Image: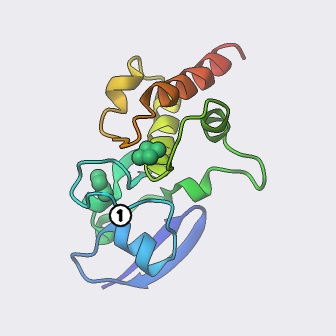
Amino acid sequence: MDISLEVNGASERLSVGPGVTLLDALRERLGITGPKKGCDRGQCGACTVHVGGRPVLACLTLAATVRQPVTTVEGLAEGDELHPVQRAFVERDALQCGFCTPGQVMSAVAAVEQGVADVREFMSGNLCRCSAYPNIVAAVEQVRRADASV
Ligand code: FES
Ligand code: FES
C-alpha cells in the first residue's frame, strides 16, 4: 500500500506492506536510523519516537496506521543548536554506549513537555544496559528546573 508520512517536517511517500512497522519504515526505507531496534517487541524503548507529539514505540506501530507527524531524535535540533534535553544529556554525561540514548531523549522530551510528576516512572520503559539511569534522570530534572525558572 502507498502511504504518506510526515517525518521531521518532511513529507515522505512510500509503498509498504500492511505489516511493516514504523521502525522499519524509518530505518530501512527512509534511512532515519536514530530510532534503534533493540528488542523489536516493545520491551526496551530504544525505538521511541513521537507521533503527533506523543511518545510511541515505533517497533509496535504499523507504518500504515500513522496519520500524524512523526518526530525522531534527528528532528529535535535546530540546525547546530541542540534541543535543551540533548544538551542536558551531554552536560550530565547521561550516556555511555549511546544505544538507548535516542529513545531516552525522545521520552525525556515528552516528560518535560508533559510536566510529568514522576520522571522515573514515566521513563521506566526505556531500558539502559549501561545503567546510566541516575544521570539520565539528572538531565531531565535539569531541564525541568530550567523551564521552571523562566
Ligand atoms: S525496539 Fe521497540 S521497544 Fe525495543
Ligand atoms: S548508554 Fe548504553 S544502553 Fe544506555
- The quadrant of the picture occupied by the C terminus is top right
69 or 144: nearer the viewer:
144
- Give coordinates of residue 55: x percent, y percent: 40, 45
Left or right position of 31 against 61: right
Q: Position of residue 69 (x, y in %)?
A: 48, 59
Instruction: Tell me which corner region of the image, top left, top right, bottom left or bottom right, holds residue 118.
Output: top left
Quadrant for residue 63, please give it: bottom left
Which amino acid is tagged 1? Answer: Val
Q: Is residue 77 above or below residue 6?
A: above
Q: Classify 140 as above or below 89.
A: above
Residue 6, given in percent of the width and then of the height, sits at 51, 67
Location of ligand 1 given as a quarter of the image: bottom left
> What residue is shown at x 42% (from left), y 78% (from top)?
28
The residue at the far right in this view is 80
- Label 1 crowd (10 A; few <14 / some 14-19 / many >=20): some
Is residue 101 visible from the viewing direction of this image? yes
